[in-house]
Image (spheres, rainbow, N blue to C red):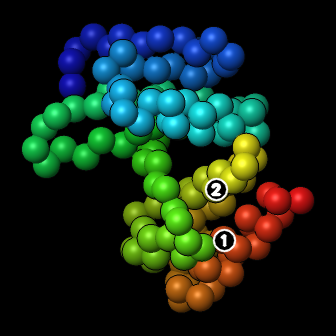
Amino acid sequence: MSDIQEYITDGLYGNRLLISVRADQTELADNIRVARVLLRCSDDMYIIINEHLMTIGHKNPEYTINGKLGDRKIISGLLGRHEDFSDGSLEYCYIVHRNNAVVLDASAFLPVEKDTIRQIISDVIERLRT
């Protein structure tokens, strides 16, 4: 990571959304869209869209949300990635659906089975639809 970070301030959310000039351009539009949904739904949130490094073995989490690294996962089914929930590597889970968002404390998923996680996420998505 370089010593000097260069960011673009978002036109809608100002300093609440900073975008690295070295962010992954292939995912930038979706990363900005999701970040804006999260910011619209939470007044006390600040997001940085991180730079993308081309280093072998380096993970590239898209976001820093309130000082914590965050990775955007596209989930096609209700279960998603069970191991992310069950291994304790998550602190929070932000569910974004149709321009609405909700945050869940990941401890709500521990220790639970796949079917329980599926039901929790299904219930949240159903609430977001209404």
Tags 1 and 2 touching, CB below 8 Å = yes
Look at the image and tell me whether residue 52 can be seen: yes
Q: Nearer the viewer, residue 1 or 27?
A: 27
Residue 45 quadrant:
top right
Q: Residue drawn 59% across and 88% down? A: 115
| Amino acid beneath label 2 | Ile
Residue 89 percent location from the top left of the image: 40, 63
The image quadrant where one finds the N terminus is top left
Residue 34 quadrant:
top right
* Residue bearing the label numbered 2: 95
Residue 50 percent location from the top left of the image: 38, 29
Residue 51 quadrant:
top left
Residue 75 percent location from the top left of the image: 51, 62
Up the image or down, 76 lies above or below 38; here it is below
Give neighbour class at mark 2: few <14, some 14-19, many 20+ (Cα, 10 Å): some
Up the image or down, 2 lies above or below 43; here it is above
| Amino acid beneath label 1 | Ile
Q: Is residue 94 left or right of residue 8?
A: right
Q: Residue drawn 75% across and 33% down? A: 40
How far apart are the alpha carbons under marks 1 and 2?
A: 8 Å
The image quadrant where one finds the C terminus is bottom right
User: In the structure shown, which secondary structural element does the residue marked by tag 2 occupy?
Assistant: strand
Q: Is residue 101 left or right of residue 74?
A: right
User: In the structure shown, which secondary structural element does the residue marked by tag 1 occupy?
Assistant: helix
Q: Earlier in the sequence, mark 1 or mark 2?
A: 2
Q: Nearer the viewer, residue 80 or 102?
A: 80
- The image's mark for residue 121 is 1
